[in-house]
Amino acid sequence: MNEPRPTINAFALGEFETNCFLVTVPGSTACWIVDCGYEPQALLSQIDQAGLHPEAILLTHCHCDHIAGLDRVLHWARRRGLELPVLASRAETGFCSRPELNLS
């Protein structure tokens, strides 16, 4: 039996047109958000319109253009009763909270 293949939708968010992604699996409402660039509203609107339920946020790295919308996405999720884990590699975790490292 063939398993459904994930679909990856790309969004160029904000002034820097940072690539952010929405990973979905056909036949499921589960999805995963990859990076949260500036102005994540288009990404969040797509999730709402498709009736999807995010399970986690994955950060490829913690430069400001990839984490700038993180607070907005987490706030959006909490308003929907979701507590999303934010996942990043161990090497990146220090960058997320230090403006001199994430260039914010």
Image (spheres, helix red, strand yellow):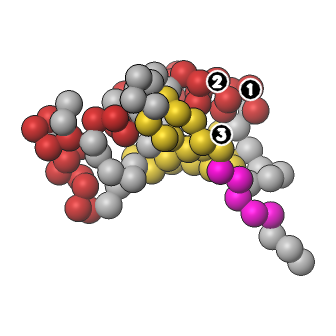
Q: Which residue is mark 2?
A: 45
From the image, tell me which residue sits under label 1. Answer: 49
Q: Amino acid type of disc 2? A: Ser
Query: Closer to the camera, 53 or 9?
Result: 9
- What is the quadrant of residue 4 in the picture? bottom right
Query: Could one spot residue 48 in this view of the protein?
Result: yes
Q: Which residues are magenta?
A: 4-8
Crowd tier of the residue under label 2, counting other residues whose Cα lies within 10 Å: few below 14, some 14–19, many 20 or above = few
| Residue at screen point 44% across, 36% down | 18
Lower position in the chain sequence, tag 2 or tag 3 = 2
Q: For the residue marked with disc 3, what is the amino acid?
A: His
Identify the disc placed on residue 53. 3
Give the SS element for disc 2.
Answer: helix
Which residue sits at x=39%, y=29%? 16
Q: Are there few (<14), some (14-19), or many (20+) residues within 10 Å of tag 3?
A: some
User: Pointer 1 and pointer 3: residues touching (CB < 8 Å)?
Assistant: no
Q: CA distance from mark 2 to mark 3?
A: 12 Å
Which residue is at the front of the view, 68 or 32?
68
Mark 1 and mark 2 residues within 8 Å of each other at the beta carbon = yes
Q: Tell me whether circle 2 and circle 3 mark residues in contact (CB < 8 Å).
A: no
Image location (x, y in percent) of residue 9? 65, 44
